[in-house]
Amino acid sequence: MAWRRVSLVGLSIGAALTLAACGGSSEAVAPPTTTTTTAAPVTTTTTTVPPVTTTTTTIAPTTTTEAPTTTLVDVPYEHNESYFFTSPDGAFQCGIIKLPSRTEAGCQGSTSPVPPRPADCMVDWGHGIRVENEGEGAFMCAGGLVYTSGDAEPDPVLPAGSKLTELGYSCNTTATAVTCVNDETSHGFTVSPDSNETF
């Protein structure tokens, strides 16, 4: 009987060892692996593009032209079938006049240089210059003012850049000079305070 007990005890120990082997493990179980993914920070780059500015420059074309010559209505200048005017600077009294035997255009006032006085001139010399129906322009010998209407008021100014054409003559003005020409012969003169020319 005693022997059977030992066997049972042996069986009991064997069964216990068998159960221990089947039901558990003496090794440590590793915890599950956790993977953490960290997203890289998002970088936003903002580029500011300046607005495009278009500048248009318009350059006026350069044109070189002479000042236009204005032909004036002759009514303010007319007096007894002749035409009288004052130069723009007031230095000369001028006229296109009709005489019984001829027509002429001339101006009176101080100019320089003056040619020598002719031997036959006994009155005022060098203060007048004119052009007649024939021949070139020339200085005149005169005893008084010829190219004036005789009105109490000065004769009207022929503005600079203007032209008066009457009785076959044309007179043009600048700020300081007067040029009168016989339209048929092309002879005439230009006169100003500091210069003169006859042609």
Image (cartoon, rainbow, N blue to C red):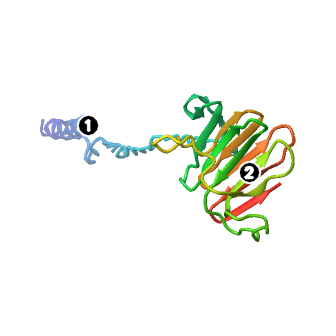
- Which residue has dot 2 on it? 130
Q: Residue at x 72, y 37 (%)?
A: 99
**In the rendered image, which residue does mark 1 sit on?**
18
Amino acid type at mark 2: Arg
Per the rendering, the mark at residue 88 is none
Of all residues, the one furthest to the bottom in this rendering is 116
State left or right for residue 187 relative to residue 99. Answer: right
Residue 10 visible: yes
What residue is at 69 percent from the left and 64 percent from the top?
195
Residue 30 picture location, percent across and down: 29, 46
Residue 111 at x, y percent in the picture: 65, 63
Answer with left or right where residue 60 lies relative to residue 153. Answer: right
Q: Residue at x 41, y 44 (%)?
A: 48
Give the residue type at disc 1: Thr
When the figure is inspected, residue 47 is found, relative to residue 81, above or below; the finding is: below
Q: x and y percent of residue 26 in the render?
A: 25, 47
- Classify residue 38 as left or right of residue 84: left
For residue 42, what is the image quadrant? top left
Given residues 42 and 163, the one toward you in this image is 163
Residue 31, percent from left and from top: 27, 44
**The C terminus lies in quadrant:** bottom right
Q: Earlier in the sequence, mark 1 or mark 2?
A: 1
Quadrant where the N terminus is found in the figure: top left
Quarter of the rendering containing residue 8: top left
In the figure, residue 84 lies in which quadrant? Answer: top right
Q: Is residue 131 above or below residue 163?
A: below
Marks 1 and 2, Cα distance to the nearest angstrom?
159 Å
